[in-house]
Image (cartoon, rainbow, N blue to C red):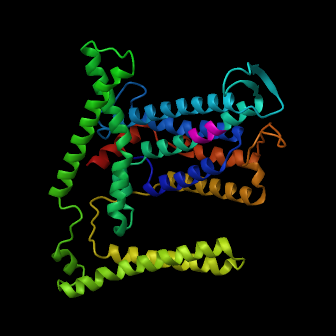
Amino acid sequence: MPYHTLTWLAWLAAGAYLALVNQQPLQSLLFILATGLVFTVVSRSNGTQSGTESASLPAGQSLKVEGWSTFLRFGLSVWFVALIFNLLFSHTGNIVLFVLPCKWPFIGGPVTLEALLYGLATGASLFAVLLVFATFNLGMDVHRLLRWLPAGLYQAGLIVSIALTLVPQLITSLKDIREAQRLRGHKFRGIKDMIPLFVPLLTTALERSLTLAESMEARGFGGIDQFTMAASGVVPISTTTELSTTSLPRNATLAGLLALLAGLVWQATNRARWLGWSLVGLGVLFVCIALYLQGRRLKRTHYRREVWQQRDTLVTLASLASISIAAYTQARDPAALFYYPYPPFSPWPRFTPQLGLAILLLAAPAMLWPSREISIKQAKDDNG
C-alpha cells in the first residue's frame, strides 16, 4: 500500500470528524468531491476502473473495489429515498414550490424549498460518512491494521476486520449468483422471484462462516500456550499464579468502567465538572492498564515492518491540520457547522472559508499518490 497504516488512521480521524459534525450542504458537497477524488485514485491504482487489472497487485483488490463501489451506489439510493420522504412528508416552510391535493393522505399539502434543502443536506451528510469509511477500507489493508492494535484488543480487532470484509464478500457472492441465474434464463419479475436469489446467498454466507470458524480453530485462535506465557516471564505455569494474573486485568477493567460511568454521570448531574473529568481520566487510565496487562500475555512477532516515507509525513500533517481547523471552528463558531433551514432560521446555507480549506486538505492522499510503476513495485515488495 502506498501509505503507512498510521497515515490512513490520521486521515480517517480527520475525515470522520468532519463528516459527522458538519451539516452545511455546500461544505458537505465539497467534502464529497474531495473524498471522492481519493476514492477514485485508490480505485484506479487497483487497475479496475480502467479495465486493466494487474496481476502484480494484491489478490482480491479488484473484488474489494467493486464491492465498495456497489456499497456507495446503495448509499446514493438511500440519499434519494431520504430526499423524497422529507420532501413529501414535511410541509413546513415559507417558500412553497408547488401544492399537492389535500385529499391525498399524508403527502397532500404544500411542498416547500426548505424541505428540499433539508433532505439534500441530510442525505449529503449520510453519504459523506459512508464515503469516508468506504475510502478508508479500500485504501487500508485490514491485516496491517491488526498489527497496530494493542495485543489485548487483538481478538476484538479480528472480529471487526471480519465484519468489514462482510459487505464486499456478500456483494461479490450476489453478483456471481445473479450471473449464474441469468445464464440459466432466470428473470426477476417480482418479490417472489427474489427467493431463489437470497437462499443461495444465505447458504454461501453460512458455508463461509463455518469454513472461517474451522480455520481459526485449526490455527489455535484464542489459545495461549503455557510455553509462550512462561517464556514471556509474565505468567508462570502455576495454576494459582495464572488465576491471580488473569484476575488483575479483569479487576482493572471493571474499575476503569465504573470510574468512567461515575465520571459521565457526575458530568451530567453536577456543576463541578473538574471532578467528573478527573473520574473519566482515571477510568481511561485503568482501562489502559488493563489492556497493557492483557497484552503482556500474548507474544506477537512481525515478519516485515512498514516503511514511513516523506509522503506519509505530508498526508499526516494535512490530516492533523484539517481536524485542528475543524475543531477550532466548531469551538468558536458552532453555527458554521449547523444547518436547519426551517423558520425562524434562514434556508440558505453558509460556507466558511477555513472549513473549505480543512476539507480540501483531505484530498492530500490523492494529490501525493505515487505513480503506477511505484505502486506496482511496492505491491511486489509487500507480497515478497
| Nearer to me, 293 or 44 | 293
Residue 235 in view, yes or no: no
Residue 331 in view, yes or no: yes
Magenta span includes 124: yes
Give how far across and how far down residue 190 sits, in percent.
Answer: 39, 18
Q: Quadrant of residue 227?
A: bottom left
Q: Is residue 30 left or right of residue 215?
A: right
Magenta span includes 203: no
Q: In this picture, is 138 found above or below 269?
A: above
Q: Majority secondary structure of the magenta segment?
A: helix
Q: Is residue 244 left or right of residue 1?
A: left
Identify which residue is drawn at 45% across, 80% down.
Answer: 255
Give how far across and how far down residue 28 sits, in percent.
Answer: 66, 40
Q: In this picture, is 224 found above or below 79?
A: below
Q: Which residues are magenta?
A: 122-127
Identify which residue is drawn at 66% across, 58% down.
Answer: 324
| Nearer to me, 334 or 306 | 334
Identify which residue is drawn at 35% across, 43% down.
Answer: 166
Give how far across and how far down residue 332 sits, in percent.
Answer: 77, 59
